[in-house]
């Protein structure tokens, strides 16, 4: 029976007199993970980074992981040395799981999703690669990843300019100073309709003033280009069945359709006075026309930062839902409490709906000032609501900021790795060409 045990890990020698270590090494030998050189002498073909800590654990002490070790490597070493997960103390949780592996996997999944429709289907791969097909793939790549080519950058710039022009026209159309008087106003059949139209300055503006012809032409041309852009994207995509299931494409179709309807309605104002439900028409049309602004979000989504921001919100959905739930609960609690705190004051908070509205405005730190307490109890409740609002809003914002920083750092590292790998392949190809 040996008094000491000698263990070699790739040239690094360890000596111990612990019998439990000897028994542990015998188990490793039985599992085929270690070799016996001679009685009491073992060899393990393994990196010795964590073996000091393995010896501590086998000798009866706690198993601590060294700082700076890769989390994935740490888990692999634990599996090799047969260290149970229960042996990890609380202080080493971060070392064991701080690998950002899930972040990299989410980024990889996001990039695969963005390339959906870019790569040809299995059936299309069988077809010979004609020049027209190659052009289609080039355009597809440029539309999905504009930063990858000069064509993509030009395409993105053109889309952005046209979209911004359409949005500027949309905004100017709502200001009477940027509209011109109509030559004639449609006849109004009854006094009720007349009073209803001219009692609302916004409604009467649509009836008495029209959009200048130059801006109608500019807006029409912009929307035609955006429609052609959408048609081109549909032609070049390899996933036509799912093209119209994408939310951004649906919103784009609605916005383009409504934009032409707005131009038609402006040139035929009798629509406004001939329908009793004109208010609903105008509100629905205006809201749907506002969807044009979502086009800018789709364009911004082509940038890495916007992709990461979207990914951050998607993976923080549980936190956002929790925030909304807490926000709703405490808005009702503080709103109803304020109503009863100001119950004897007839000048403030006539009903609980108003007090809940006040709570929403206060918790979000907006503070319109349209409603406010006037009594001592109301002041106290307002102070509590304001302080709680700061705490409630600050915590999820800090969490989202931390999540964005993690994803963005991983995205930056992955991008640098991809560029380095691409450069390495180019250097290998150049070297092979020089040798030939």
Image (cartoon, grey):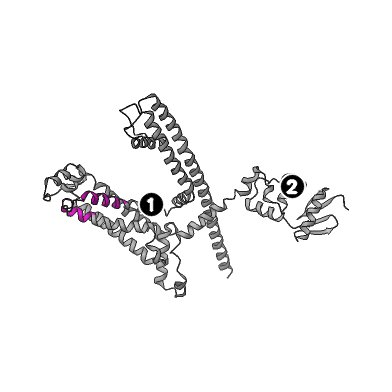
Earlier-in-chain disc, 2 versus 1: 2
Q: Secondary structure at mark 2?
A: helix
Residue 276 magenta: yes
Q: Which of the labelled discs sits on residue 57, or is there none?
A: 2
Above or below, 427 against 85 in this view is below
At which x and y percent is residue 393? 45, 38
Which residue is situated farthest in the top direction here? 376
Q: Residue at x 69, y 45 (%)?
A: 64
Q: CA distance from mark 2 to mark 1?
A: 54 Å
Figure check: 226 above or below 59: below
Residue visible at 72% across and 44% down in the picture: 62
Q: Is residue 301 left or right of residue 13?
A: left
Of the 4 image quadrants, the one containing the C terminus is: bottom right
Residue 178 location, x and y as percent?
21, 45
Q: As rendered, which of 327 and 56 lies closer to the eye?
A: 327
Instruction: Please tell me whether mark 1 sits on a helix, a strand or a loop.
Output: helix
* Residue 192, image x, y percentages: 14, 45
- The kind of secondary structure the magenta stretch mainly shows is helix
Q: Which residue is mark 1?
A: 297
Residue stretch in magenta: 262-290
Q: Is residue 323 above or below residue 129?
A: above
């Amino acid at each position: 029976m040996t008094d000491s045990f000698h263990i070699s890990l790739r040239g690094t020698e360890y000596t111990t007199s612990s019998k439990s270590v000897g028994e542990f090494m015998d188990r490793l030998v039985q599992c085929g993970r270690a070799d016996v050189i001679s009685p009491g002498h073992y060899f393990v073909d393994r990196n010795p980074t964590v073996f000091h800590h393995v010896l501590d654990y086998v000798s009866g002490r706690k198993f601590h992981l060294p700082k700076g070790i890769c989390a994935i490597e740490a888990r692999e070493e634990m599996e090799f040395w047969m260290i149970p997960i229960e042996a990890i103390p609380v202080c080493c949780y971060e070392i064991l799981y701080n690998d950002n592996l899930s972040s990299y996997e989410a980024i990889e999944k996001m990039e695969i999703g963005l390339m959906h429709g870019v790569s040809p289907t299995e059936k299309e791969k069988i077809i010979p690669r004609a020049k027209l097909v190659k052009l289609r793939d080039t355009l597809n790549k440029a539309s999905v990843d504009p930063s990858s080519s000069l064509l993509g950058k030009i395409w993105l710039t053109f889309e952005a300019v046209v979209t911004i022009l359409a949005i500027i026209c949309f905004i100017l159309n709502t200001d009477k100073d940027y509209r011109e008087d109509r030559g004639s106003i449609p006849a109004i059949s009854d006094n009720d309709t007349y009073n209803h139209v001219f009692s609302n300055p916004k409604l009467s503006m649509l009836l008495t003033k029209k959009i200048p012809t130059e801006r109608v032409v500019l807006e029409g041309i912009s929307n035609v280009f955006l429609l052609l852009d959408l048609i081109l994207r549909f032609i070049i995509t390899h996933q036509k069945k799912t093209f119209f299931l994408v939310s951004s494409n649906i919103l784009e179709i609605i916005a383009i359709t409504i934009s032409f309807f707005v131009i038609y309605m402006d040139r035929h104002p009798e629509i406004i006075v001939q329908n009793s439900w004109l208010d609903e028409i105008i509100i629905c049309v205006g809201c749907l026309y506002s969807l044009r602004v979502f086009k800018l979000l789709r364009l911004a989504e082509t940038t890495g930062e916007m992709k990461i921001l979207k990914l951050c919100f998607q993976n923080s959905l549980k936190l956002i839902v929790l925030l909304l739930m807490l926000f709703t609960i405490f808005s009702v609690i503080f709103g109803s409490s304020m109503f009863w705190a100001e119950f004897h004051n007839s000048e403030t908070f006539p009903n609980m709906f108003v007090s809940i509205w006040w709570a929403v405005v206060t918790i979000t730190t907006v503070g319109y000032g349209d409603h406010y307490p006037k009594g001592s109890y109301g002041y106290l409740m307002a102070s509590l609501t304001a302080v709680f609002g700061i705490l409630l809003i600050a915590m999820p914002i800090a969490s989202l900021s931390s999540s964005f920083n993690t994803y963005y750092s991983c995205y930056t590292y992955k991008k640098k790795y991809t560029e380095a790998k691409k450069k390495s392949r180019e250097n290998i190809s150049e070297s092979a060409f020089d040798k030939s």
